[in-house]
Image (cartoon, rainbow, N blue to C red):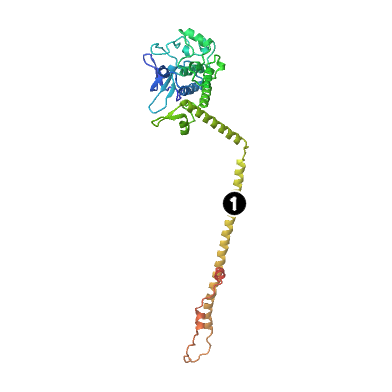
Amino acid sequence: MHHPNAVTVNDFGTTEDGWLYIVMELLEGRTLRDLLAREAPLDPARAVSFMLQACAAVGAAHDAKLIHRDLKPANIFIEQRPDLPAVAKVLDFGVAKFAVDEHEDDDYQTLTQVGAIIGTPRYMSPEQCAGTAPLTPASDVYSLGIILYEMLTGTVPFSADTPLALAMKQVTEAPRPPREVVPAIPRELETVVLHALAKQAIARPPDANEFRRELHATAEELGLEHSDSTVAPTMAALRHAGTQSPSGRLVIDLATLRQVQAASSESDSAELANDAAAKAKFGRMNVPMEKRATAQAAHRGRVAVVTMIALIAIVAALGIGYRWRHNSDGVSSSQPANANVAAPVAAVASPSQSASPSPSPSPKPRITNNERKNENKKPKDTSFWSKWKRRIFH
C-alpha cells in the first residue's frame, strides 16, 4: 500500500539461511511513544493534526479491505525534518510481528506473539479482546480513539497489572471522560473521542475515513491548526489575539486566536451557504448543441453557394466585356486599311487612253492650316471602353 502517511516498503523476502527480511524507507524523527514520554499531554491542535494524518493512512488501508489490528503510539512515527512540518506515518501495516523484544518495546504487554491474539491490550477494542466476533474497521477506530485520548490527557483510559485484567476492563468498563483529566480540552473534542470509544462497534464511526471527517469538522469548528486547515489567520486577527511586549514583539494567545479563527470559519460557511442558495434560484437552461451546430452548418452552406454564384456571374461579365472590346477594336482598325487599298486602284484607273504631251509643271497647291490639322487628326475610336472613358472624363 502506498500513502504519504504510511511507511513505504521497498522489498521483502527470505535469505538463503531462511531469515525473513523487510526493507522500508529510512525515516528521521521518533515514534509517538517517545514523543508522549517527553511532552504529554499535547496541545489539542497538535494532537488533532497527528490523528488526522494517521486516520488518512488507516482509512486508505480500510478502503483496500485491510485491518491494522495493532495500532498504538509505538507504531506511529513522527517524521521531523528541518524547516518542514511534522508528518505522521503509520508503521506495520498488515504485518504480524515475528518476535517481540519486551526490553525494546515500551508497550511490553503485547499479544502479538505467535499463537496469541494480535494486538496490544491497552489499545485493543472490546471485540478484539473478547475474540467472539469478526473484526471490522471499527476496531481500528477504537484504537485510534485511545491514542487520541492519550495524546490529549497524557494517560490511557484503562490500565491494569496483567494483560487479562486490562482486556476485561476494555470489555466491561466505561472510559473516564477526558475533561475530568484535563479540563482545558474542548468539549466538542471530548465528544469525538468518546464516540470512538463506544463499546459496541456499531455505535462507533464505521471506519477511519468517517472518524477523520468527524474530527476534521470539529477541528474546523474550533479553529484548530492542522495540516489540512484552510483558515489562515490574518494580521488583524493576530493583533486582536496577541499582546505587544515592551520589546515590540507580538505575544499570541492561542485560545483567543482559535476563537477568532472559529468565528471566521463560521462566517465563511454561512457565505458559502448563501451563495449556494442564491445560485439555486436560477433554473438550468438546456441548450440543444447538436441542433445549433446543424443550423450553423446549413447557414454556411447557403453562404458558400451564393458566393460561388456571384463569382461565376463576375467572371461571365468580364468575359463578355473582353469579347465586346476585342470586336470593336477589329472593326475600327479595318476601316483605314480599306481606304489605303482603294486609293491605288483609283489612281490606276484614272489615266486616259489617249497620249498627250506632258504638261508643263504647275505649282503645288497651298495647304492651309486647317487641312494640316485634318491630316494629322487620328481617326476617332468608337470602341466600348473609349465611349465609357469619354462619358467618365467629359
Q: Nearer the viewer, residue 101 or 211?
A: 211
Can residue 277 be seen? yes
Q: Quadrant of the C terminus?
A: bottom right
Q: Residue at x 51, y 23 (%)?
A: 215
**What is the quadrant of residue 276 in the picture?**
top right
Examine the rendered structure and indicate whether residue 44 appears above or below residue 343: above
Q: Residues within 10 Å of mark 1 (few under 14, many from 20)?
A: few
Residue 116 image point, x, y percent: 46, 9
Residue projecting furthest to the left: 17
Three-letter code for the amino acid on which mark 1 is drawn: Val
Total tally of numbered discs in the picture: 1
Q: Nearer the viewer, residue 186 or 166?
A: 186
Q: Nearer the viewer, residue 359 or 116?
A: 116
Examine the rendered structure and indicate whether residue 348 appears above or below residue 232: below
Q: Nearer the viewer, residue 255 or 52?
A: 255
Examine the rendered structure and indicate whether residue 306 appears above or below residue 210: below
Can residue 9 be seen? no
Label 1: element kind: helix
Residue 87 image point, x, y percent: 43, 24
Q: Residue at x 59, y 58 (%)?
A: 313
Residue 154 image point, x, y percent: 45, 16
Examine the rendered structure and indicate whether residue 36 appears above or below residue 172: below
Tell me the residue that label 1 is attached to: 303
Q: Residue at x 46, y 18 (%)?
A: 151
Residue 231 image point, x, y percent: 49, 30
